[in-house]
Amino acid sequence: MIGIELPTLNTNDSSYTLVEWLVPDGSSIEGEEPLALVETSKASEEIESTGPGILHVLVGGGQDCRPGQTIAYLFESAEERDSYRASAAAPAAASAPPDAEPSITNAARALADRHGVSEAELRGLGRTVIRTADVEALVRRASSAPASPERQLSKRQRTVGAVVTESMRTVPAAAAYAKVDVGQAEELARQLSERTGSFVSLPVLLIKAVARRHAAHPLMFAALTDDGVVRESERAHVGVTMDAGRGLYTPVVHDAAELSGDRIADLLTGFRSKAFRGTFQAAELAGATIMVAPHTTEGMVLATPIVFPGQTCVISIGAVDDQVLLDAQGTPRTHRFVHLGLVYDHRVVNGRDAMALLKDVKAELEAPAALG
């Protein structure tokens, strides 16, 4: 008998939802194959078998489960499983008990989050499986009722709140800012977009520029351990904050220094689609060693994001701002500027180090030939 334990899929969650089993209880498993779909506050992940055997389910679809919990067993034979069931050593929970949490489809959960429908309201429907039509009925009912000043935060937003609170509690942050002329960078982005067909933007070039500075500024890509040791990373894995209206996500561009600008652009395009649909896999949100936070909505000049726990710094970029300056001959010319903001963990990084990184990234963006 081999136990199938639920791995840690998201360090911000203490529990997950086992959405459904992909194979029926009692099935014969040939080897490593997907068995169950588990949903965290930010992603859905398939749980695979650890080998061949006869599946015996311990946690039913729609139920909550925690990291490290045994959710199923694999027996060598049907006879061994039957013997185990007969011994009543543990309940055979192929189906959820009457008072179990309902199973909520991904589409229904996303719709509920968008409209602020609480878990209690969903449970109150008394259904085993909750679909989008059920949530739509709740939304219609709420719209016809008198307006309430209270609104239930979504599970995703509560997770964001937990991360922000942890950052504010544990990271003594400081900040530095730089003004960057991005006229040449915008021209490079336009040329790359035309040549490759990818949507290359200033945030794309910023990700590349930051990643290229990894070797020169290793502390900016490091993590401070609980015992006061700084653990430097071997690679530049750049996380990107992204909100398409359904919650904040931080997908990761792995090995960003090795990727071309158009490849990074394609990854961001795919990330935006997944952020809108809420379909990230856990691996796409894990492993960031530094963070980039685009705040490029028109009129946004400066932004001061938080340093994510486990990282040392985050770099923000604001919207482009046109300014007219006189050239050497006294002729007025329009320049295109953005402001970069660097927020850093002052336990690890000092102001001199922060300004050195900003200076290098500024130089990369103002002479961007190497960022293509």
Image (cartoon, rainbow, N blue to C red):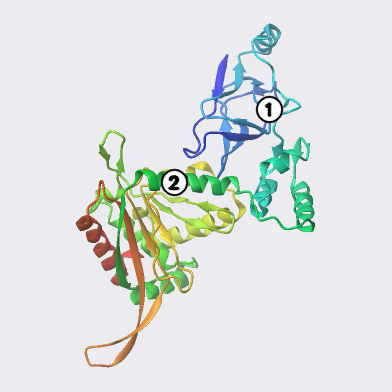
The reply, left or right, for residue 124 in relation to residue 63 is right
Residue 152, horizontal then vertical, whole percent: 63, 48
Name the mark on residue 60: 1
Is disc 1 placed on a helix, strand or loop?
loop
> Which of the pair 218/243 is nearer the observer?
243
Amino acid at pointer 2: Thr
For residue 216, what is the image quadrant? bottom left
Q: Please rate how many residues cluster around mark 1, counting C-alpha atoms within 10 Å: few if below 14, some from 14 to 19, many from 20.
A: many
Amino acid at pointer 1: Gly
Which residue lies at the image location 68% right of the left edge and 27% below the top edge?
60
Q: Quick check: marks 2 and 1 in contact, CB under 8 Å?
A: no
For the N terminus, give its image quadrant.
top right
Is disc 2 placed on a helix, strand or loop?
helix
The reply, left or right, for residue 317 in relation to residue 150 is left
Residue 126, horizontal then vertical, whole percent: 78, 36
Task: Give the CA distance from mark 2 to mark 1.
Answer: 33 Å
Q: Residue furthest left?
A: 352
The reply, left or right, for residue 223 in relation to residue 24 is left
Q: Would you place residue 46 above or below residue 82 in this image?
A: below
For the C terminus, give its image quadrant.
bottom left
Residue annotated with mark 2: 165
